[in-house]
Image (spheres, rainbow, N blue to C red):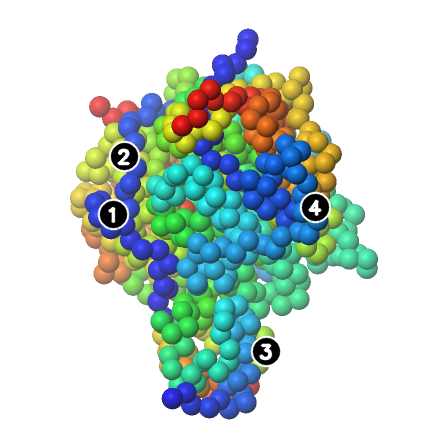
Amino acid sequence: MTARNGASPPASGAPGRRLPRPGRITPVRISSFTAVSALGRGRDAHVDALRERRSGLRPNDFTGTPLGTWIGRVDGLEEQVLPGRLAEWECRNNRLAWLTLQADSFIEAALQARDRHGPGRIAVIVGTSTSSIGASEEAYRRLTPEGLYPEDLRRPIVHTPHSLGDFVQHALGLAGICVTVATACSSSAKVFAQAERLLRTGLADAAIVGGVDTLCGSVLFGFNSLELVSAEPCRPFDVERKGISLGEAGGFALLEREALAGPWLLGYGESSDAHHMSSPHPEGLGARLALEDALARAGLEPARVDYVNLHGTASARNDEVEARLLADLFPARTRASSTKGWTGHTLGAAGIVEAVLTLLALREGLAPGTLNSRRLDEACGPQIRLENEPAAIRYALSQSFGFGGSNCVLAFGGELPA
Amino acid sequence: MNPPVRSAFVDGISFWAPRLPGWELARQVLRGETTAPAEPARRPAPALLPPTERRRAPDTVAVSLEVAARACEAAGLDPATTASVFASTHGDLAISDYMCDTLVSTPTLTSPIRFHNSVHNAAAGYWTIATACYAPYTALSAHTSTFGEGLLESLVQAVTDGWPLLYVAYDIEAKGPMATMAPSAGLLGAGLVISPRASAHSRLRLDWRVVDGASHPPTVASPGTLALVQGNAMAPCLPLFEALATGRGEVSLALGPGLALGVEIVALECRG
Amino acid sequence: MVATHTSEERELAEMIIAALNLEDVSPEDIDPEAPLFGDGLGLDSIDALEIAMEIAKRYGVQIRAEDEENRRIFSSLRSLSAHIQQHR
């Protein structure tokens, strides 16, 4: 059974490309960044786990109804308490957002930026897939006899997708542009693009970007219904991969044009697959367009890319298409890997978590390999590595592809390309 | 300090609600030239979709594809090369109700079709499948400021990329217990094609700037217009469409607690 | 020539039409021996998953639709119905 392609391919010319390639953008500094995932809280926890090749995945202990799969669960979320002034936003997703703001003192950096630029001049652009739907799920479990939400969950803001953006804005006392992007698994990659455009047009002086997604019944049983979840820890690009492991995570980055230190956002590329709601384009056409646009905005050739953090979910179709694309476009010296064996697929948070891991790879001179995988699919070229390798990484990409055929590729640099 | 005023052009307008099914009719009703039909129209059929996607299309997809297609038609724009911004306050409330309800009783019997339609970007995904569009889209929400933030992102993309862009805003009817916390009634879809430059298709000029929210409270639509889309969560779009209907006027659209998007609709002297 | 349905096959055909919202298809249009997937009815892999879920719900029979070994079961209305009857 193959998914039918609802769309016809373009008739002639470069496949799919009908708008001209974008020009270079002015790079933007990333003055602070952090993440919290099943690997732990903050940058060091992530570097240590990468170096020690320690996976954050564990057998599913999250769902009431048994589901035989492995998950990337963040420890201690149940004990987190939001400050009283933020009680209205209380839910698992916003607790993880709060925990993530504390990591690496990100909140201090954000508040200092607020003092420098003013609360109205800092945009909040954050991504999520399901936001705090977990709170709505809980309300349905605990409906009153009249069929109403229990009193403690009668808080409209946690039952709408913007729960996350609204929480981050209030937690930081900001008053600027504030948007929650929800394009499934590309959400918290696309936030970098949206924020860059706001900075470029002068509508903000700085932007808090990032994303948070937490485990919930909707995604665990939803992906289970698509037969996409693996009964074992996910093995990206492995010839015997059995599907994805779901995870939860949060991450933030502070983008400031005027900052004096920090790595650079060099470019971004966004595209659509025009193919199917839940299967990637068989030739990776949309992914390729996003990749080409990211390189064009960064002013980079594929040969200058040292490391690519792949989407690599360990689903049969994604990994095959993505591996062929890599083999097609990059020289053998470019290293590439999926880090989902460490974190699981964190869906709407995958963009920011993998952006953070990519920035850490730049900073540490460490090209992560691909955890849990043993034998690579024959579609893989020499770029995709299983083992970690020390490497001088100057320029790196992070790829995120989502349901609905939404693709985003980000280009980062420890220095500016000539 | 006054923030700079920037200009964009409105090349296509579309609108769909059960009592205002289509922009031509809506325009006449909002201008007071005619009255809205008493009988609500049936949900538009997403005729653009291939059969496989069409039979799976939920209301969010039906209403947003209708206004997306009409806006592009009006602007003489090829959807296949057009980037888009899709904005919805709550996304697919009917599927959210189904998911939450099923998770209580039989989580392992969750419908894969409904799950893959549950993503906030389902409407945008179906649109790009229907039109063979490889150009980027985004899908966003900002609670009660969703319409304003989505329009702002559309204007920003038009400025930075230099190409006409499709903006689609929609919300659907809430179902089940969810309706008490995320209220929304009926269907409402609104579409605009926004261009950074005037063209033969340009109908109106749209001058915009981001202003302080406290001194620019959101414009409220007339009671008559509000009554026609009773309680839909995308109702904050109405003041702009009233101005578009008359071809002039200033409106303020909320951008969260601190800011507003100030928009002035200006008639073009000579229409192509 | 379309072979006639057994009563179980007809019930299954009705279930598939309702679950997939098949436009303008009646149970008689589904040839019990013709391929279910591919060009005929225009069904794809997500439809197979939806059918598998509906079968689990109605008959209590679990079939993994994405499993290569289950291709034969999903090959026609007749084979799918026979599998359900054997395992319910």
Q: Are marks 1 and 4 on the same chain?
A: no
Specify whether B209 is left or right of B234.
left
- Give the letter of the chain under mark 1: A
Q: Which residue is mark 4?
A: B183
Q: Are marks 4 and 2 on the same chain?
A: no
Q: Secondary structure at mark 3?
A: helix
Q: Establish if C31 lies above or below C44.
A: below
Q: Are marks 3 and 2 in contact (CB under 8 Å)?
A: no
Q: Secondary structure at mark 4?
A: loop
Image point (63%, 32%), residue name: B31
Q: Which residue is mark 3?
A: C58
Specify whether A260 is left or right of B212.
left
Image point (52%, 74%), residue name: C17
Which residue is nearer to you in this view: B73 or C72?
Answer: B73
Q: Are marks 3 and 4 on the same chain?
A: no
Callout 1, which amino acid?
Pro
Among numbered discs 1 and 2, the one appearing first in the sequence: 1
Distance in Å between CA atoms under marks 1 and 4: 43 Å
Q: Which residue is mark 2?
A: A21
